[in-house]
Image (tube, rainbow, N blue to C red):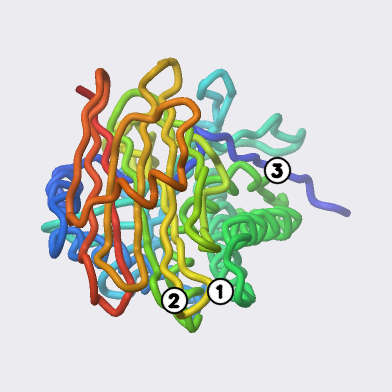
Amino acid sequence: MALPSLPFQLVPCSPDGFPVENNQGYQLLIDQAVSGGSGTSNYLQHMLRFSAFTSYLNTQGQSAFATQQLPSGAMQAVATDGVTTMNVAVQLNPDLSETDLNGVPVRGIATVRLALPEPTELAKIISFGLSLAEIPAGIVVTNTLIQALFKPLLQQLTSYVQSTVERWLQIDVGEDIDGLGEDLADAAGDAAEDIGAESADLVVEEVAVAEVAIDLSAAVPAFAALALLVAVPLLITALSKQFQVHLEIDNQTDTDFTWSTPYTYNGAMTVQPAQSVLPRMGRAVDAWGDRTDVPVVYQANFCTMNKSGYEGTGFALQLSPNGFTGQDLAVLISIPWAADNGLWIGDYSPGMDWEDAFDNYPEEEVRVSHGNQKFYTTLSIDALSGNDDSYHCVLRIQPL
C-alpha cells in the first residue's frame, strides 16, 4: 500500500536574490571596500572565501552536514570548512497550522545562511515559506510527528544545496563565458527539478507513515544569484585569460535598480546576473526563532575578461532607479592592455555614445564617486595595474 504524500512547496519570502545581512560587520567591511586599493582588495578576498567553502562542499558531499536541535524547537543542518559556515534551518508552526506569508498560507519557514566568522561577520541569507495545501486523511499531527518531519525536510533541502554545487562545478566553461550566468542558473533549476521529484520517508516511532517531497523551484533565482559569487571564481581560474575583473554592486537604498550593459570593450566577455533588477534593501525572515527578521542588502555580481592575451577588457553599466526619471547612472570600468585602469561614474544622458565615453571618460583613480538629486554612488578598484591582471571592483549606491 502506497504511503500518503506530503508535498511541500517553497514560497519566496523576499525578492529574487541572496542578500547580505546589514549587520555591523558588513557595514565596516563595505566602508573598507569602497575606499579603493588595499581596502577593496581585502573586502573582495574576504568574499571569495565563500568560493573556498563551495569547493569544500563539493568534495565532502552530504557528509559535510550535521543536524542539530535548536532551543527554539527548530532544527538545522550545519556544514563548515573551519572558516565559512552554512546553516540550513527549518522552523514549523505549532500543529502545522497555517500562517500568512505575503498572502500565501505556510506551515513553517526554511532558511539558508552562509556566514564568515566574527569579528567581521559577513552573512548571506535567504528564507522561504513552507507551504502544504492539505494534510492527508489519516495523518494525525502530533508533536512526535512534527519532530520527525524535520529530518526529511532538511534532507531534501541539503540535497538540493549539494546537488546544485556539484552541477555548478561540473560546467564546462570552454573559452566563452558569456553564457556562464545562464548555465549556472540552469544548473540550479535542474537540481531543483531532480531533487523535487524525489521523496524521503517520514518515520514516526520507527514506522514510515508518509513520503515527504518539496517543490524547490522558488529557490532557483536565489541560488542562481549566489552562484555568481561562489562558483564563477572557481570556474574561470583555469582559463588562460588575462585581465579578469570582478564587480560587486551593493544597493543600500529603498529603490529597485534595473541594470544593463550597453557596451563591452572590444570583445570582452561578461558573466552577469540572470535577473536584471537589483532589489532595494529589505528584511529577511529567518528560521531560528530568536528574531522575526533581519535587515538585508541585495548585491549583484559581475565578471568580465578579455578574449585574447593582447586585448584589454572592461564594460559600461547603466543603472536605472525604478520610479524616477532623469536619475539614471552611467558606470565605466576600463582595464586597458598597456595603461593604468580607469573608473568613471556620471549621469546618463539619452543617446549617450557609450564607446566614446568608455574611451575618454575613465580616470586613473582607485576610487571615484558621483551624486545626483537622489543617490550617491561610489566605485572602487583594488589596483590600477599589476595585481596579476585580476582586479576587483565594488560599487555602492546610497540614498541622498
Closer-to-camera residue (372/217): 372
- Helix, strand or loop at disc 2? helix
- Helix, strand or loop at disc 1? helix
Q: Position of residue 166 (x, y in %)?
A: 58, 72
Residue at point 41%, 27% (across, down): 349
Q: Name the quarter where the N terminus is drawn.
A: bottom right
Left or right: 311 in relation to 49: right
Q: Position of residue 82 (x, y in %)?
A: 27, 74
Snapshot quadrant of residue 164: bottom right
Q: Amino acid at mark 2?
A: Ser
Q: How many marks?
A: 3
Q: Is residue 328 above or below residue 294?
A: above
Q: Name the quarter where the C terminus is drawn.
A: top left
- Helix, strand or loop at disc 3? strand
Q: Is residue 353 above or below residue 367?
A: above
Q: Judge whether residue 200 can be spotted in this image.
A: no
Q: Amino acid at mark 3?
A: Leu
Q: Earlier in the sequence, mark 3 or mark 1?
A: 3
Return the residue at label 2.
55
Q: Which mark is residue 169?
A: 1
